[in-house]
Amino acid sequence: MPVINVEDLTDKDKAVMEVNQLKLEVKLERWLTSKCCEEIKDYIQALVEEDTLVKGISEEKNPFKEKGGCVIC
């Protein structure tokens, strides 16, 4: 998709682009926020056991764990 510099467009071109965008958006199915929030909450709760942000990373799978200690003589 080519990059369009909006500053180079005429007012008519900008209006046409805006109308086209609004035509696309009006076709989108709209959901109630409360329904979306419930679905997101259910999805998160269903996958909480696999979520590394919740569970953490096991020591054997952690690529960032320290390999060895530092000894100062």
Image (tube, rainbow, N blue to C red):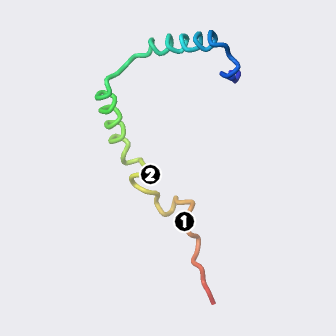
> Where's residue 5, x and y in %?
69, 23
> Where's residue 40, x and y in %?
35, 34
Which amino acid, mark 2? Thr
Tag shown at residue 52: 2
Residue tagged by mark 1? 65
Mark 1 or mark 2: name the one nearer the start of the chain: 2
Residue 72 lies in quadrant: bottom right
**What residue is rendered at 71% in x and 21% in y?**
2
Above-or-below relation of 49 to 34: below
Q: Quadrant of the C terminus?
A: bottom right
Q: Quadrant of the N terminus?
A: top right
Residues marked 1 and 2 touching at CB (< 8 Å): no
Q: Residues within 10 Å of mark 1 (few under 14, many from 20)?
A: few
**What residue is rendered at 58% in x and 70% in y?**
67
Measured in 3D between alpha carbons, the distance from the residue under mark 1 to the one under mark 2, in whole angstroms, is: 15 Å
> Where's residue 16, x and y in %?
59, 10
Q: How many marks?
A: 2
**What residue is rendered at 34% in x and 40% in y?**
46
Indicate left or right for 36 with 70 as reference. left
> Where's residue 31, x and y in %?
34, 21
**What residue is rendered at 54% in x and 65% in y?**
65
Indicate left or right for 8 with 66 as reference. right
Which amino acid, mark 1? Lys
Residue 34 lies in quadrant: top left
Residue lying at the far front in this picture: please name it: 11
Tag shown at residue 13: none
For this rendering, which residue is in front, 43 or 14? Answer: 14
For this rendering, which residue is in front, 48 or 17? Answer: 17
